[in-house]
């Protein structure tokens, strides 16, 4: 694992730096906390998010008590070096209330205005649905019917989406494309492929094109 570059971090007079925590799959902001140099080094060494509690004045490993640990994939600093972004893979809710994110209360603006993060949230929701009663969940029922049935649904929705595109049916395309995306996610689960793997493939292709 690469050595952490502490020299790029500007700690405040108390030796702390704010840390914004982001879900690597959905890009959703999960929480904000504080870290000192020791917490950052422990995070880099263990690969799990470690922070500093200002109220208890001690180090704490996120999820150490609840089990909802956060695997850290990257630590980024902002342009001034005085704020960090931790890109993580959460194993459970980030908030002590049981909510997925600590930022679940809106005080201004449209609620659920971050459509760009919804695909990742939907993915996590569908993964949970997989283990539920097929009688109560369409997703669980579809997965229980096996890969062939899932593939059939992807094919059906793909054809319907293509027809809507070919005929210029804008509303129909929007509806069918949503169906197709949903069934593609279910197919990923059925095939044992994560959403991040698919996104990584897209990123690699994009980078290859940029390098040309």
Image (tube, rainbow, N blue to C red):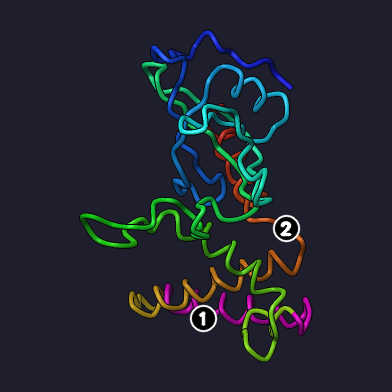
Residue tagged 1: 160
Mark 2–mark 1 Cα distance, whole angstroms, equals 24 Å
Q: Relative to 33, say whether 9 is above or below.
A: above
- Label 1 sits on a secondary structure element that is helix
Residue range corresponding to the magenta coloring: 144-166
Q: Residue at x 43, y 13 (%)?
A: 10
Q: Position of residue 120 (x, y in %)?
A: 53, 57
Which of marks 1 and 2 precedes in the sequence? 1
Residue 174 is left or right of residue 100, and the answer is left
Q: Relative to 146, say whether 82 is above or below.
A: above
Q: State the quadrant of the N terminus.
A: top right
Q: Position of residue 103 (x, y in %)?
A: 39, 51
Depth check, mark 2 against mark 1: the one in front is 2
- At label 1, counting other C-alpha atoms closer than 10 Å, the crowd grade (few under 14, some 14-19, many 20 or more) is some
Q: Residue at x 61, y 66 (%)?
A: 185
Q: Residue at x 51, y 76 (%)?
A: 179
Q: State the quadrant of the C terminus.
A: top right
The furthest residue to the left: 108
Q: Position of residue 33 (x, y in %)?
A: 46, 35
Q: Look at the magenta stretch and give its main secondary structure.
A: helix
Q: Position of residue 62 (x, y in %)?
A: 61, 40
Residue tagged 2: 193
Residue 102 is left or right of residue 169, and the answer is right
Residue 136 is left or right of residue 81, and the answer is right
- Looking at this view, is 52 or 139 the one in front? 52
The furthest residue to the bottom: 135
- At label 2, counting other C-alpha atoms closer than 10 Å, the crowd grade (few under 14, some 14-19, many 20 or more) is few
Residue 31 is left or right of residue 148, and the answer is left
- Label 2 sits on a secondary structure element that is loop
């Amino acid at each position: 694992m690469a050595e952490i570059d502490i020299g790029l971090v500007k700690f405040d007079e108390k030796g702390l730096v704010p840390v914004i925590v982001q879900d690597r799959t959905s890009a959703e902001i999960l929480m904000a906390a504080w870290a000192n140099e020791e917490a950052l080094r422990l995070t880099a060494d263990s690969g799990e998010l470690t922070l500093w509690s200002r109220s208890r004045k001690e180090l704490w490993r996120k999820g150490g008590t609840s089990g909802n640990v956060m695997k850290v994939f990257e630590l980024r600093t902002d342009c001034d070096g005085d704020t960090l972004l931790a890109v993580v893979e959460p194993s459970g809710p980030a908030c002590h209330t049981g909510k997925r994110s600590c930022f679940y209360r809106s005080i201004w603006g449209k609620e659920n205005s971050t459509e760009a993060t919804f695909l990742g949230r939907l993915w996590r929701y569908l993964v949970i649905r997989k283990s539920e009663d097929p009688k109560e969940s369409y997703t669980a029922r579809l997965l229980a019917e096996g890969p062939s049935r899932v593939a059939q649904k992807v094919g059906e929705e793909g054809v319907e989406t293509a027809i809507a595109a070919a005929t210029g049916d804008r509303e129909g395309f929007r509806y069918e494309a949503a169906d197709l995306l949903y069934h593609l996610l279910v197919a990923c689960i059925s095939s044992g492929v994560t959403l991040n793997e698919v996104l990584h493939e897209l990123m690699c292709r994009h980078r290859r094109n940029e390098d040309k």
